[in-house]
Image (cartoon, rainbow, N blue to C red):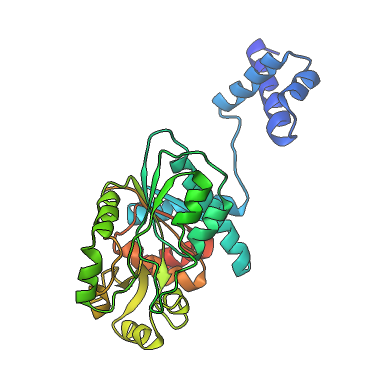
């Protein structure tokens, strides 16, 4: 047998043992009676020669394809899709939280001081709970959204404080209700010195993390006491399907023309965004809302689930 063919066969054997049989490089070396360094070179040679073709037969592979399709279709800088095959709502929520925590950690686990804007909601709070403990007192965390309801109670799904506790960063709450009583009342809140301090800090943000909400009966804005049933009904009649930090949005991704827009105190979101704006949302109930937000060009990044991704791509055409 020619020496070149012998090397070729040996490389193929090493690759088979490593990739198919699941042997370690030490085990490959022992079985082929070569050193570990030679075994490593044989495996590398097999890859270079095109003898190794890797196919991942797993839902994650389809999720990667869906994520890339979403990224291309909506011009996103990043997109992650978690597998969700028959998961319960709680299981899906946990998967989104785990994936989201990894994204948070990638941005926050850096030495450079950052200003991080945060929305609120159940998904973001679950993400914070999944995050590892980080020591990054150099960062500043800024709430995008006022968390005071009509009755004066505070929204338990605000995330700036728990995020601060996880990261040892300073946090800055927006000192205002989510919805003021009137446009005049909003002007009073938004012109307060402390509000302006937080707003000016938000303008310097390096990244924004938000959730995507729905506008329907029993939605989070209603359940948490920010809007009542009649207000939700009026928004639906104005074709609102989604909300970002309390701002109602229609199917086309545009802000809904409603008196509520004149009462909201949340910090503004730029469109198109000048910095990373990453949303975390999933589940059958939210798919249409996520699609609306993507159509509107509000995001640069998205973490969602497999079923929502399929719905969005199917509806987007």
Res 259 → quadrant: bottom left
Question: Which residue is outermost to the bottom?
Answer: 230
Tally of marks: 0
Residue toward you, 53 or 127: 127
Residue toward you, 214 or 111: 111
How far from the left and from the top, in percent, is residue 26?
A: 75, 21
- Residue at 24% x, 57% y: name it: 196
Answer whether residue 269 is visible to the viewer in this image: no
Q: Is residue 157 above or below residue 270?
A: below
The quadrant in which the C terminus is found is: bottom left
How far from the left and from the top, in percent, is residue 87?
A: 63, 66
33 relative to 194 in the view: left or right:
right
- Residue at 59% x, 69% y: name it: 89
- Residue at 58% x, 57% y: name it: 95
The quadrant in which the N terminus is found is: top right
How far from the left and from the top, in percent, is residue 183?
A: 21, 76
- Residue at 40% x, 87% y: name it: 229
Answer whether residue 260 is visible to the viewer in this image: yes
Question: Which residue is outermost to the front?
Answer: 193
How far from the left and from the top, in percent, is residue 82?
A: 54, 56
């Amino acid at each position: 047998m020619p020496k070149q063919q012998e090397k070729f066969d040996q490389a193929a054997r090493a690759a088979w043992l490593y990739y198919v049989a699941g042997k370690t490089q030490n085990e490959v070396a022992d079985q082929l009676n070569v050193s570990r360094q030679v075994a490593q070179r044989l495996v590398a040679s097999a890859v270079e020669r095109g003898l190794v073709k890797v196919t991942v037969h797993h839902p994650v592979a389809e999720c990667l394809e869906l994520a890339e399709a979403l990224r291309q279709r909506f011009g996103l800088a990043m997109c992650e899709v978690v597998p969700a095959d028959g998961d319960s709502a709680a299981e899906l929520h946990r998967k989104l939280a785990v994936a989201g925590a990894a994204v948070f950690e990638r941005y926050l686990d850096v030495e450079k001081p950052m200003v991080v804007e945060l929305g609120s909601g159940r998904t973001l709070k679950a993400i914070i709970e999944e995050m590892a403990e980080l020591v990054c007192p150099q960062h500043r965390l800024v709430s995008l959204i006022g968390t005071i309801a009509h009755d004066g109670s505070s929204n338990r799904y605000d995330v700036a404080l728990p995020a601060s506790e996880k990261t040892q960063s300073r946090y800055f709450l927006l000192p205002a209700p989510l919805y003021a009583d009137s446009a005049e009342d909003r002007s009073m809140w938004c012109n307060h010195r402390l509000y302006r301090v937080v707003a000016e800090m938000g303008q310097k943000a390096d990244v924004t993390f938000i959730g995507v909400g729905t506008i329907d009966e029993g939605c989070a804005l209603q359940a948490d006491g920010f809007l009542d049933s009649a207000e939700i009904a009026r928004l639906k009649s104005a074709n609102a399907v989604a909300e970002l930090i309390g701002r109602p949005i229609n199917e086309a991704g545009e802000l809904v023309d409603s008196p509520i827009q004149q009462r909201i105190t949340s910090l503004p979101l730029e469109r198109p965004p000048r910095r990373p704006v990453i949303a975390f949302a999933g589940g059958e109930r939210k798919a249409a809302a996520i699609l609306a937000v993507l159509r509107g060009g509000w995001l640069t990044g998205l973490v969602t689930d497999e079923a929502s991704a399929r719905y969005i791509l199917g509806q987007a055409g």
